[in-house]
Amino acid sequence: MDRSEIITDKFKDLFRDSSQRLEKNSSELINSFRKEAMEQFLALGVPGRENESYKYANLEPWFAADYKSYFIPEQADFKIAEDFKCEVDDLDAYSLVLLNGFFPTLNGTLMELPNGIWVGSLAYASVRFRDIVEKHYSKYALNGKDGLVPLNTALASDGLFVYAPAGVKLDKPIQIVNLVESKEDMLVQHRNLVVVEENTDVELIVCDHAISPQKFLTNAVTEVFVGQNASFDILRVQNELNNAAKITHTFIHQERDSRAVTNNITLHGGMVRNSTYHWLNGTGAESNALGLYLTDKWQHVDNFVNIDHAMPDCTSKQLFKGVMDDFSTASFNGRIRVARDAQGTRAYQNNNNILLTDDARVYTKPQLEIYADDVKCSHGATVGQLDEEALFYLRSRGIHKDEARLMLMFGFAHEVIENIKSEAMRDRMDGLLLQRLRGELSRCTTCVINCEKDLPHC
Amino acid sequence: MLQIKDLKATIEGKEILKGISLEVKEGEIHAIMGPNGSGKSTLAAVLAGREFAKITHGSVKYMGKDLLEMSPEERSKEGIFLGFQYPIEIPGVSMVNFMKTAINEHRKHRGEDPISASDFLKIMREKKALVEIDSALTSRSVNEGFSGGEKKRNEIFQMAMLEPKLSILDETDSGLDIDALRVVANGVNKLKRDDSATIVITHYQRLLDYIVPDVVHVLFDGKIVKTAGKELAIELEEKGYDWIKKEVDSE
Ligand SMILES: Nc1ncnc2c1ncn2[C@@H]1O[C@H](COP(=O)(O)OP(=O)(O)OP(=O)(O)O)[C@@H](O)[C@H]1O
Ligand SMILES: [Mg+2]
């Protein structure tokens, strides 16, 4: 038996042994997807290096490791999560805490924000808002090639649910703090569903934060429906420990004249893989996929983006930037597909990288599949060092070489941050970026949060 | 203040500066003119500490110290300022942050505390007025999207902020419209102190009507081939460089 079979077998056993417990704690709707999803996973397996889009992400060791399977939260966990009252300076946001992929609150698992937007636990929403969930759940996370998506469908039991009914406006962002905390090594699989109906506007800030040093593997799937003329922003800030692996799959389904922005900012993480899919399903839709990754030591950050222009007159932009230090590696794989009828498409892609050492590496690969003829499409990738002339310019004004280098890296990375919608968040991210570049961002610097309670293990 | 002795430098193995000697004293204004490609910018960059040219011979003393031993940032903190012929655009680095960092490095060098936010704003305001630079420009990234003339004005703004001892202005006049030229030249004159000196590199006599030089040098093929008073600039404007080339050739 080779290693990948050992891994799939392990999950097969896991599924068999825990499915009863899983089903008991989930809704009938969510359970109805499990069996088939598991079969799909068993057929596809964990993507290995032979999978073109996972060529540089070495996932097998992470999946081969043993984890304490952690499907159901216990009362004590609810208490831990409740204790974290976190906020960003000046950021007026609705804050929610997820613990190990669950939505644990002692007083209610679904809440209605003042303007009629619902946020809370997906598990509960699949009962309370059964019709909505049924309409969207597992409808967009369709990818016949990546076994990790069905693995999540088979094993996930909870995660974030956001529902913005037609016409409501979110007056401030929703901030989700994903805490990962355990005494034992753990596999986390959250499943999020965001439904943004027509003419609404939702901004999400997701902050991942491990608070104990155990080995964590996260495999999270997020599905987002963005209705006609609606607007959706998601900013994900990843600041994980070296022994954490984070895999996210984000599927954005966009209707006519909608606008969606995804932004993945990876400040730190042992192994990070973000797959972002925008499906442009209506004319005039606009999508913006952004990312920033800063790596050092032996880290690896992997970004996969897939923009599907299924309908005419849509615009998509991708901007991914990275700074790699030491022996770290990164990969960017950006795919644009333009369907035959998608005339008037505009699709732009940029991936710019700075390598700080001779040993750092980046693999960048654009993939364009264009079947329409009236299309404006451009892509560019750069891999370079810091600009010597710019460095001299700064130094010639008296700025020390190290500081000048830092300013250039900051300026380079800032272009991604500039796109963040809320000013308080932009400022906060600039601050974090600076700390990160100065090497002052400890694992206990909570990513975008200030918590009332001191974090353990710091 | 500055003594350059028989300075030779190569770029990629090719000799660009072929034995330059020049002395600048406190209070003086020197103009350097010369045809395209003669090495003016190379000389300016070498004085500011850019490492693209390899010094093969000669010495440069500045305020009694060996200039060539100093890093670019040290030279700046010791009072040398280079106004770039082609200022660099640095996206993502704000003018404010750039200038504040520079000023604080200079202050640290003099043993002073970092500048307070209110003092910094005050100085910014004063200097902006001096070179009549648009406030919108200083709230943007360094030179990003600035027009050619705006970039030049921004160089003089930075000079005003840093109050250098020795300013080397490399074709600061090219790209400036007539009014901007006067503003910039007046700015340079106002910044002049008894103990400071200026080297202006230019192709045009017009600038020298405003910034009146004590000495004019002609740099030709990596060498200073002629040095005279300000009337030399007028002669060059009328006759071009051909006659100098002939003089050089006949020697
Ligand atoms: N980085 C470089 N690499 C190769 N050659 C260079 C480089 N910089 C300058 N040179 C060469 O050195 C010579 C002198 O250039 P320099 O820019 O000093 O001339 P200049 O006198 O300032 O000209 P201009 O009046 O056009 O500004 C030119 O032949 C130029 O091509
Ligand atoms: Mg020049």
Image (cartoon, coloured by chain):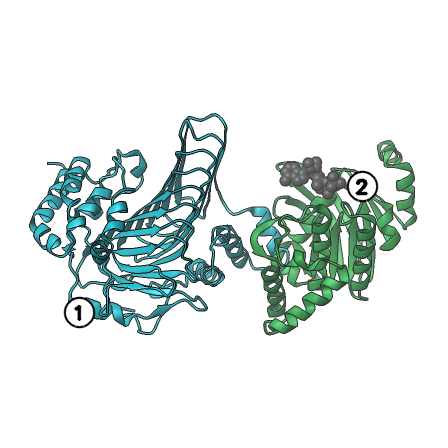
Chain colours: A cyan, B green
Residue shown at 59%/69% (left/top)? Answer: B108
- Could you tell me if residue A454 is visible in this image? yes
Instruction: Determine which quarter of the picture holds residue A37.
Output: top left
Which chain is mark 1 on?
Answer: A
Residue under the point 69% across and 68% down: B123
Height in image: A316 above or below A119? Answer: above
| Crowd tier of the residue under label 1, counting other residues whose Cα lies within 10 Å: few below 14, some 14–19, many 20 or above | few
Disc number placed over residue A76 in the picture, else none:
1
| Badge 2 element | loop
> What secondary structure is marked by label 1?
helix
In depth, the one of B105 and B247 nearer the eye is B105
Q: Is residue A257 left or right of residue B209?
A: left
Residue designated by label 2? B34
Q: Is mark 2 within 8 Å of ligand 1?
A: yes
Residue visible at 10% across and 50% down in the picture: A19
Q: Could you give the CA–CA distance between mark 1 and mark 2, rounded to whole angstroms?
A: 81 Å
Q: Amino acid at mark 2?
A: Gly
Residue B48 in picture, x, y percent from top left: 67, 53
Q: Is residue B127 above or below residue A281?
A: below
The reply to whether callout 1 and callout 2 are in contact (CB within 8 Å) is no
The chain letter for the residue carrying disc 2 is: B
Residue A61, image x, y percentages: 21, 46
